[in-house]
Amino acid sequence: MTIFVGNLNYKASTEELTAFFQQRWNVKSVTIPTDRETGQTRGFAFVDLATEAEEDEAIDSANGEDFMGRPLRLDRARPRRQA
């Protein structure tokens, strides 16, 4: 399962976001999508933690927490829609 991280500061890096989550949980991976044309981040990310229990805890406790001046919006990521 993956966590969707919304309202992400556009200047945030994968390293900074990884460090934020690693303070309390075991991070498997962090992905910050970028715009294909501009290369600019899109204001959201996906975080995979080691266990589903950690993901539930992260969503419950870090939702709304300040990260780089913005309150994070955490939720379970939904599968991508097929075109």
Image (cartoon, helix red, strand yellow):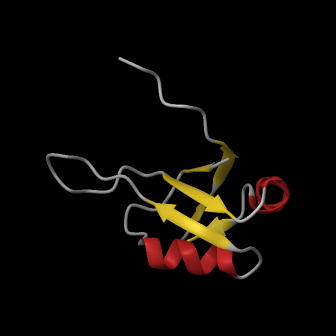
Which residue is situated farthest in the top direction here? Answer: 83
Residue 44 x, y percent position in the rendering: 47, 51
Residue 20 x, y percent position in the rendering: 62, 76
Horizontal relation, residue 30 to residue 83: left or right:
right
Horizontal relation, residue 52 to residue 26: left or right:
right
Specify the quadrant that holds the C terminus: top left
Give 49 or 66, whichever is nearer the viewer. 49
Residue at 46 percent of width and 23 percent of height: 81
Q: Residue 10 is drawn in which quadrant?
A: bottom left
Residue at 50 percent of width and 57 percent of height: 8
Which residue is situated farthest in the left direction here? Answer: 37
Residue at 76 percent of width and 56 percent of height: 55
Count of labels in the image: 0
Q: Residue 65 is drawn in which quadrant?
A: bottom right
Residue at 77 percent of width and 53 percent of height: 59
Horizontal relation, residue 31 to residue 37: left or right:
right
Residue 79 x, y percent position in the rendering: 56, 31
Give 28 or 44, whichever is nearer the viewer. 28
Residue 77 x, y percent position in the rendering: 61, 40
